[in-house]
Image (cartoon, rainbow, N blue to C red):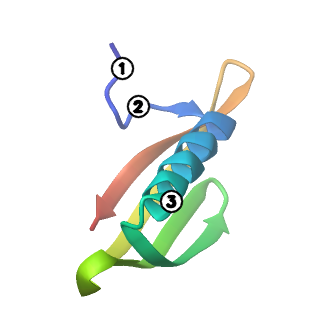
Amino acid sequence: MPGKHSPIPIHRYFAIHETILRQFQDDGVIVELELSEEWHWPVLEIYGRIKLRGGLILDVDKTLSIKEIGKEDCIHTVSYSY
């Protein structure tokens, strides 16, 4: 079974990413999103801040890499810190 940082299709990664963030926003856990994306093909960097309920702040720094597997562009996490 693939690990949680194994390559997956790009469209699937972003669907999961958006769904999880939206769920936390809808539940009131996330108060404000201040995330940015920078593409340096084949690398994507996601960084910024997530402000949480209770005044907590989560700093995000994530680097992902894109590679073609079969005929599909897939993405996987290279490094991250929260």
Q: Which mark is residue 63?
A: none
Please name the residue shown 33% across and 13% down the image. Answer: 1
**Cα separation between marks 1 and 2:** 6 Å
Q: Quadrant of residue 15?
A: top right
**Cα separation between marks 3 and 2:** 28 Å
- Mark 1 vs mark 3, foreground winner is 3
Instruction: Look at the numbered discs 1 and 2 and tell me whether their residues touch, using CB distance below 8 Å.
Output: yes
Q: Disc 3 on helix, strand or loop?
A: helix
Q: Disc 1 on helix, strand or loop?
A: loop
Please name the residue shown 57% across and 60% down the image. Answer: 44
Look at mark 3 in the image and give the residue it sits on.
26
Please name the residue shown 27% across and 68% down the image. Answer: 82
Q: Position of residue 40 (x, y in %)?
A: 64, 66
Look at mark 1 in the image and give the residue it sits on.
2
Q: Is residue 11 above or below residue 53?
A: above
Look at mark 2 in the image and give the residue it sits on.
6
Amino acid under disc 1: Pro
Amino acid under disc 3: Asp
Q: Residue furthest bottom?
A: 55
Q: Which of the two discs, 1 and 3, labels the residue nearer the N terminus?
A: 1
